Image (cartoon, rainbow, N blue to C red):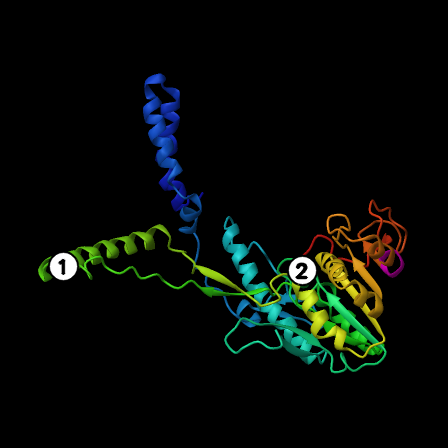
Amino acid sequence: MSISLSSLILLPIWISMAQILQGGPDEKEKTTALKDLLSRIDLDELMKKDEPPLDFPDTLEGFEYAFNEKGQLRHIKTGEPFVFNYREDLHRWNQKRYEALGEIITKYVYELLEKDCNLKKISIPVDATESEPKSFIFMSEDALTNPQKLMVLIHGSGVVRAGQWARRLIINEDLDSGTQIPFIKRAMDEGYGVIVLNPNENYIEVEKPKIHVQSSSDSSDEPAEKRERKDKVSKEIKKRRDFYEKYRNPQREKETMQLYIRENGSPEEHAVYVWDHFITQSAAENVFFVAHSYGGLAFVELMIQREADVKSKVTAVALTDSVHNVWHQEAGKTIREWMRENCCNWVSSSEPLDTSVESMLPDCPRVSAAGIWKVKGAH
C-alpha cells in the first residue's frame, strides 16, 4: 500500500490529536493549540505535492487521441474511448487533464465550423480596437443576404463554446451527439442562412501584473551603508519566502484576472448584441431560433428587451431543456402569449416523442424529446 506525502505529514498530528482527546480536561490547552495548527494547514496545497506536474499536451495527437470516421474520440494506439481516471487517486490532476483536452476540442470544433460547414468567423464587437478583448460568432456566407430563412443557434451554459451542445458528449459519445454540426448542415441543405452564437465567451483571462513594492529605504535620509544593509536583509527575506513558497505550493498556477468583452459580458448581453448588429440586418423574411438550456433563458431576455422587433422578425423558436422562467425574468403577458403560439420546449422525458409534458409555467408548450435529445445534464 502506498502512502502519500501529505498523509505522512499529517499522521503525527492526527495521532497527537487522538491521544489528547483521550486525556482529561487538563489537555484542553494542547487541544486548542493543535486545532489551531490544523487550521493553518492548507490540505489542498499539501495534496498538490503528490501530483505530477500540470503540464498537458496542446494537441489531440499529444494526448494520443483522434476522432475516427464515426466522429468518436479514440486512443490512437489502443482504440479505446477516453479514460478520465488516467491516474488513480488524483482526481484534481485528472480533472485538469480533462479540462486541457476540452480546450483542444473547443478549437477542433471551431475548425470544423469553418472547414466542414463553411462558416465565417466574425469578430465582435464589430468596432473593437486592436487592443481591447474580443469574442466571435460564426455565420454562413448568406446569413445576412438570404431573403427567405435564417437559423440562429444558441448553446447552454458552462464550458461549451460556439458549435457545441455538450463537451461531455463530444468526448464520451461522438461529434454528432455533442456538437451543433448536424443542425448546421441540415439547415444549410434546406436553404437556411445560419448564425452560431458564442454566449459563454464573455471575457479573456490575462496574468495578473506583479505589484512591485518600492523599498522604504529609497526615499529615506538614512546613510548609504544602512540602506545597503537593509536592502541586503530584504533580499534575503524574499529569497527565503520564495523558497518556502516553492516548497509549500509546487503546483502553484498563475494568478489571472478577467477582462470582460464590451457589450458581451454575459450570455444575455451577447444575445442582444448579436440581434442588434447582425440578425436585424439580415434580409430573411423568417428567422428561427434553436436554443438549449440557458440559451432559452437568453432568448427570453432578448425578447423582453426587444419585444416588438422579435415579434416582427422571428417565426418560431425550438427550445431544448430550456431553463427560462417567465416569472423570474418578469416576462409580460404579451410575451407569454406570443411564446405559447410560437415556441415549443422539447424536454428530457421517457414519454414518446412529442408527447405533451405538463408545465407549471404559463408560457410555451413542453413536449417530450424522448431519446433523440441526449444533452440532458451536460454542459
Which numbered circle lies on residue 190?
none
Picture layout, residue 72 above or below residue 27: below
Q: How far across and how far down the image is residue 171, in percent?
A: 65, 62
Answer with left or right where residue 154 lies relative to residue 9: right
Quarter occupied by the C terminus: bottom right
Query: Number of marks in the image?
Result: 2
Q: How far across and how far down the image is residue 370, in percent?
A: 84, 54
Residue 175 quadrant: bottom right
Q: Earlier in the sequence, mark 2 or mark 1?
A: 2
Q: Nearer the viewer, residue 108 or 319?
A: 319
Disc 2 and disc 1: Cα gap in Å?
Answer: 68 Å
Q: Nearer the viewer, residue 82 or 333?
A: 333
Three-letter residue code for mark 1: Asp
Answer with left or right where residue 304 lies relative to residue 37: right
Dots 2, 1 in contact, CB < 8 A: no
> Can residue 340 be found in the magenta stretch?
yes
Q: Residue at x 43, y 57 (%)?
A: 52
Residue where numbered disc 1 is placed: 221
Residue where numbered disc 2 is placed: 172
Span of residues in magenta: 339-343
Q: Secondary structure at mark 2?
A: helix
Q: Main secondary structure of the magenta part?
A: helix
Q: Residue at x 42, y 62 (%)?
A: 208
Q: Nearer the viewer, residue 209 or 19?
A: 209
Q: How far across and how far down the image is residue 322, in percent?
A: 76, 55
> Can residue 158 be found in the magenta stretch?
no
Three-letter residue code for mark 2: Asn
Q: Is residue 370 visible?
A: no
